[in-house]
Amino acid sequence: MPVPFADRLAQAVRRKRTPLVVGLDPRLEMLPAELALAAPSNPQQVSAVYERFCCQVIELVAPLVPAVKPQVAFFERWGPPGLEALAGVIRHARQAGLLVLVDAKRGDIGSTAVAYAQAYLGPQAPWPGDALTVNPYLGPDTLEPFLSLAAEQGRGVFVLVKTSNRQSGAFQDLPAEVPLHEHVAAFVERQAAQTTGGCGYGAVGAVVGATHPQQLARLRKLMPHAWFLVPGLGAQGATAADVAAAFDPRGLGAVVNSSRGIIYAWHQEAYAHLGDKQWQEAVQQAARDTIEQLRRHTPAGAL
Amino acid sequence: MPVPFADRLAQAVRRKRTPLVVGLDPRLEMLPAELALAAPSNPQQVSAVYERFCCQVIELVAPLVPAVKPQVAFFERWGPPGLEALAGVIRHARQAGLLVLVDAKRGDIGSTAVAYAQAYLGPQAPWPGDALTVNPYLGPDTLEPFLSLAAEQGRGVFVLVKTSNRQSGAFQDLPAEVPLHEHVAAFVERQAAQTTGGCGYGAVGAVVGATHPQQLARLRKLMPHAWFLVPGLGAQGATAADVAAAFDPRGLGAVVNSSRGIIYAWHQEAYAHLGDKQWQEAVQQAARDTIEQLRRHTPAGAL
């Protein structure tokens, strides 16, 4: 039996003493000047630059954080060459000793979900993630193929429960006896409790946005056995204090993602003095500062 | 301004006199013997065979139906070569004069949704669909980038409203004042009504499973301006009579997908006499029979 994902994540968080995950969102208009393309429309060239940039970011943050979260959409937008680059980025991150949380938000009916699960969680997955984000709208039977393959392979799944975007409440907070996202949470908790490893958490986690702190606190109580993947820190407006409720007293139970706030740090006022030419320093400094804020304002200080 | 997707779909349905869409779901274990691989584990070989099979199916059904629906998951499962094959299949279908409804069920927060939209609906899309299926769970603001790019490009979007799988009700039917999927339907109808073309339907449609006929009838009333993409016919158990309520009296307003029931027809008892060696005849005969059933049992007879 492979070591369960939940335990590998706990181990990695403890080793790096931080729950910070760096999101890999390559965007043409944000790249440092040394990687900028004169005519950024050739998918091969763009993909090569994306891979180079993400691999450099990986090397900068690998000593500091337990995991990276590549966002598939930015690679997929450039077609097959982009997805070749994604495979290279995932490979590089694994070689650097990082866990890889693939953010693809996939979901489909049973027999089709099997194919998506194989692509990211299978033994011969072209994009092998330690975990994958999945969308619950279609129903529990459509999540099952992801969950069972993940458990079998010692990999994990993060189910979208409460997302970080502005209008996430429109459907997710639908006021019924309990709101929709709490139904999804109940499903996640049942599945997580059935797959609990030594660290006390299961193979099925939840994506819970940092931008809704009160719901975050309630969802923590509703899903005591689920790792949380918390997006929204930094560019989306949430602070370290906003995510405090996601952790257990040991500083475990949640990993917190920041993408733009770290990988494009030199575009921000706080790091602008480093400038485009020292973008690498800006990335590392922003990662260190974010780690420090999480230590100071959350139970991650106990790590 | 490009011709709106809704009108192009109406025109194609009228020209072929059927709302039948053929789903392209390549599966190794179902391919005809002449395309079977000895050791089906090499992604390049599998992808080449998938492309060959799907292109042959396209040629068989192009004279009969208005559109095909490639299921991205089956291609994605094999990595970048699979997605190269998907691009080839889409190209082939367009050259054969078919509309292409790309079934990818994508969805993500705003800035990321833009990247997915570009991949399937943009002017330089690597996988150019006439329409794309999208997942509403994250909320209206996350659908907006798909809708606006689609409208601008004369392309369309089908939002998952009520899916065909067994447990689709677990979240979608959440009993509130109105169930979740009806909230999604209300959103779809508003968007569709704002983008109505000459045919009376808008650029935003709805995926509504054929396996829940009563909900289908109610959703038709709630979304009078939305084209329906109706899966579930054939292998998933729904009959032509089950989908009758999806149409307007002109026979427009819905396209009905069948995948396995057509592209693997020779595996079924009704066509087994044709056998593996005459699989092409079985595919065409199954398409013709399904078209005939839809004509007899639904307003598609008015086409």
Image (cartoon, coloured by chain):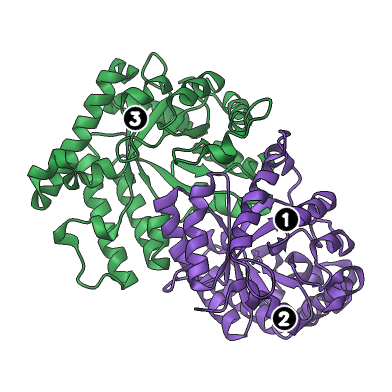
Chain colours: A green, B purple
> Residue at left 46%, top 57%?
B145
Badge 3 density bin: few <14, some 14–19, many ≥20, Cα 10 Å: some
Q: Please, is residue A288 above or below residue A247 in the view?
A: below
Q: Are marks 2 and 3 on the same chain?
A: no
Residue A164 image point, x, y percent: 44, 38
Comparing labels 2 and 1, the label whose residue is closer to the camera: 1
State the image coordinates of residue A134 (x, y, percent, origin top left).
Answer: 54, 44
Q: Position of residue A273 (x, y in %)?
A: 7, 43
Of the residues tagged 2 and 3, which is closer to the observer?
Answer: 2
Asked if the residue at tag 3 contacts the one at tag 2, i.e. Cβ–Cβ closer than 8 Å, the answer is: no
Q: Which amino acid, mark 2?
A: Val
Q: Is label 3 in a helix, a strand or a loop?
A: helix
Real-space Cα separation, disc 2 to disc 3, in angstroms? 53 Å
Q: Sequence-wise, which precedes: disc 2 or disc 1?
A: 2
Residue at the location (75% across, 55% down)? B209
Q: Quadrant of the C terminus of chain A?
A: top left
